Amino acid sequence: MNTMLRFSYAVKLTPDRKDGGYVVTCRDIPEAITQGESKDQAIAEAEGALQAAIEGRIEDGLEVPAPSQPKRGERVATTPITTALKAAVYMALRDSGISKSELARRMQVNEKEARRMLDPKHQTKVPTLERALAALGRRAEIEVN
C-alpha cells in the first residue's frame, strides 16, 4: 500500500529581539534554520531552507522525514514542487530497493539520466519525475490550498 507523501512542514517563527525579524526553525528537519524581516519573508525563506535541507539529505543518502502536524502557534512552509517530486522519487526508490540502473531500465533512459534526475543541481523536468514515479508504482497529485 502506498502512503501519501506531503512536503509541507511545520515551522516555528521566533521573534528576534536583538536584531528584529523572525528566526525560523523546523522540528522535522532541524538543519532548516533561517530568518526573515517579516512573517511572510520568514516563511518564504523557510521554503528555501527546506529545499536546501531536503536536497542535502538526498545527496547524502539520508532519510527525508514526513512532516509532523503543526502545533499551536506554528506555521506551514512548503517545498517547491520540483523539490517535492525529487524527494518523492528518492523516497520511492529507497523504499523499493531497486537500483538507479533498474529505474533507468524501467523508464527506458540511460543510467546517467536516472542519476541526474535526483541531482539537486540538475534541472529535472516535471514529466521526467512523473515518469520515474510511475516506473516505481507511484503517481503525483497536486493539492492547492
Image (spheres, rainbow, N blue to C red):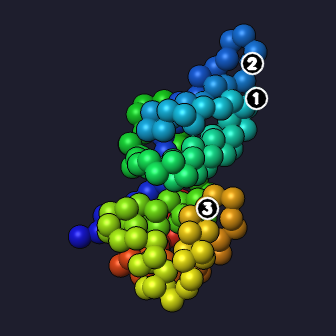
Q: Residue at x 54, y 34 (%)?
A: 31
Q: Which mark, by number, is residue 97?
A: none
Asked if the residues shown at circle 1 and circle 3 are in contact, with their CB atoms under 8 angstroms apart, the answer is no
Q: Amino acid at mark 3?
A: Asp
- State the separation of the CA atoms marked 2 and 1: 7 Å
Q: Residues within 10 Å of mark 1 (few under 14, many from 20)?
A: some
Q: Is residue 128 above or below residue 12?
A: below
Dot 1 corresponds to which residue?
A: 37
- Tell which of 132 and 105 is nearer to you: 105
Earlier residue among tags 1 and 3: 1
Dot 2 corresponds to which residue?
A: 20
Dot 3 corresponds to which residue?
A: 119
Q: Residue at x 61, y 61 (%)?
A: 119
Q: Secondary structure at mark 3?
A: loop
Q: Residues within 10 Å of mark 2 (few under 14, many from 20)?
A: few
Q: Amino acid at mark 2?
A: Gly
